[in-house]
């Protein structure tokens, strides 16, 4: 235990001397060969190591789903059944599973794929056929951290569009809904429900409680949509009509739906994702003429992420020529953010930024370690 105390002391002495220059990194993710230069990041693993989305691989509009990591770069995943136009929507935490959509020339509607590092890409088809015995409209939006729960939307045998939660070969309908996101353990599903009154309302669904509407912000159009949920399932983010137009919101059981405001000069904001406990939220905000990514926390409120990266994180040189437009997802620890923007050559490109703790955070960690070691020593 003496060694633990000494190690903590050494770490504490050096924490304040660690250079912040090694800290923050921003990279464009590139694109797949062939076709126009276009890539878009859709989602990332809980730890931020893996990114999935789509890149144009033929002509101007034919997409291919990709999986990106720092070790491999951008890898195309193809499409099953000889199809094309695939697009990745979620990746498991270990990077071994990706789900997304694809088109097939003999099937009228989009279908769902599941890619596995061992088995490659396959048609994910646990859905019933429609009234004409044909594969109907299917979609996917998110997946649990271990890849064993998948959520999205499909058209059932009654031709009604419903949300779904798939787990261990068990398909459960989420009535009236479009499932947009799921918690890390797969137990909480969020999205948008079209109620019998034709009102579109953000919802939260669990097996125990079924569908619960989250309401709306006051003063605007009665329409809301849940876009993301924290990994622990306790915080839901999205957009709602409000007195200032479409506005990003944060919902908790304790506080209900709370508007997050907007950026200066903007007319709308949309929250896309949150970190593990919902304390940090990312999304997009702007007007009819501009879009900017935002980051929100309770201390600072909503801030322009690009301005923050340039002015406070020392990334102005790396970001020269870039126009960041949306942040689509954030890692559980809040340090990795992905999104899309216009690169210096004028093309749409996915990007990833990684922020490391400030030296003061390392010092606090060392203090905590030292305190713990001391408590153990004198027990």
Image (tube, helix red, strand yellow):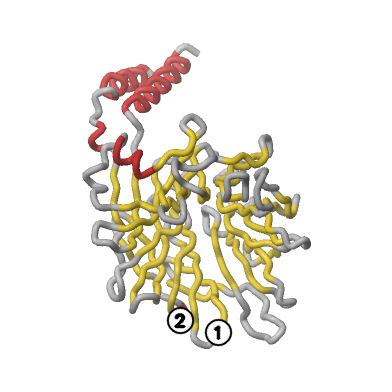
Seen from the viewer's position, the closer of residues 332 and 6 is: 332
Q: Position of residue 12 (x, y in %)?
A: 31, 20
Q: Name the residue at 66% across, 54% down.
A: 223
Q: Report which quarter residue 344 is drawn in.
A: bottom left
Marks 1 & 2, CB-CB < 8 Å contact: yes
Q: Position of residue 250 (x, y in %)?
A: 59, 42
State whether residue 61 is above or below residue 144: below
Q: Is residue 185 left or right of residue 21?
A: right
Q: Name the residue at 68% across, 54% down.
A: 201
Seen from the viewer's position, the closer of residues 135 and 200 is: 200
State whether residue 58 is above or below residue 321: below
Q: Residues within 10 Å of mark 2 (few under 14, many from 20)?
A: some
Q: Name the residue at 42% across, 55% down.
A: 289
How far apart marks 1 and 2 lie (CA) works out to: 10 Å
Q: Is residue 139 left or right of residue 198?
A: left
Q: Position of residue 309 (x, y in %)?
A: 32, 41
Q: Name the residue at 59% across, 72% down.
A: 138
Seen from the viewer's position, the closer of residues 27 and 72 is: 27
Q: Provide the secondary structure element on which disc 2 rests.
A: loop
Seen from the viewer's position, the closer of residues 97 and 240 is: 240
The mark total stands at 2
Provide the residue designation for mark 1: 107
Q: Position of residue 305 (x, y in %)?
A: 39, 43
Q: Provide the secondary structure element on which disc 1 rests.
A: strand
State whether residue 10 is above or below residue 238: above
Q: Residues within 10 Å of mark 1 (few under 14, many from 20)?
A: few
Provide the residue designation for mark 2: 83
Mark number, residue 376: none
Visible residue check, residue 238:
no
């Amino acid at each position: 235990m003496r060694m633990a105390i000494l190690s903590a002391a050494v770490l504490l002495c050096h924490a304040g001397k660690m250079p912040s220059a090694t800290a923050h990194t921003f990279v464009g993710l590139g694109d797949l060969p062939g076709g126009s230069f276009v890539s878009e990041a859709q989602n990332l693993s809980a730890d931020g190591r893996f990114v999935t989305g789509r890149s144009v691989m033929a002509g101007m509009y034919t997409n291919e789903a990709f999986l990106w990591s720092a070790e491999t770069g951008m890898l195309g995943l193809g499409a099953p059944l000889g199809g094309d136009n695939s697009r990745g929507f979620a990746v498991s935490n270990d990077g071994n599973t990706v789900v997304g959509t694809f088109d097939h020339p003999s099937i009228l509607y989009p279908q769902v794929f599941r890619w596995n590092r061992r088995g490659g890409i396959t048609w994910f088809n646990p859905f019933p056929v429609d009234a004409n015995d044909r594969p109907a409209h299917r979609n996917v939006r998110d997946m649990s951290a271990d890849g064993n729960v998948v959520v999205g939307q499909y058209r059932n045998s009654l031709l009604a569009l419903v949300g779904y939660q798939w787990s261990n070969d068990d398909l459960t309908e989420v009535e009236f809904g479009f499932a947009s996101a799921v918690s890390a353990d797969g137990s909480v599903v969020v999205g948008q429900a079209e109620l019998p009154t034709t009102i579109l309302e953000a919802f939260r669904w669990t097996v125990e409680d079924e569908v619960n509407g989250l309401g709306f912000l006051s003063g605007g159009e009665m329409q809301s949509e849940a876009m993301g949920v924290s990994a622990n399932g306790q915080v839901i983010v999205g957009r709602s009509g409000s007195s200032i137009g479409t506005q990003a919101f944060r919902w908790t059981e304790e506080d209900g739906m709370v508007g997050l405001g907007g950026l200066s000069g903007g007319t709308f904001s949309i929250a896309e994702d949150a970190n593990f406990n919902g304390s940090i939220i990312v999304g997009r905000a702007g007007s009819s003429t501009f879009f900017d990514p935002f980051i929100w926390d309770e201390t600072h409120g909503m801030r322009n992420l690009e301005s923050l990266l340039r002015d406070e994180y020392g990334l102005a040189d790396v970001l020269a020529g870039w126009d960041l437009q949306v942040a689509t997802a954030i890692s559980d620890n809040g340090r990795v953010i992905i999104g899309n923007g216009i690169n210096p050559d004028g093309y749409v490109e996915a990007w990833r930024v990684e922020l490391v703790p400030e030296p003061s955070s390392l010092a606090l960690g060392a203090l905590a370690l030292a305190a713990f070691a001391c408590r153990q020593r004198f027990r």
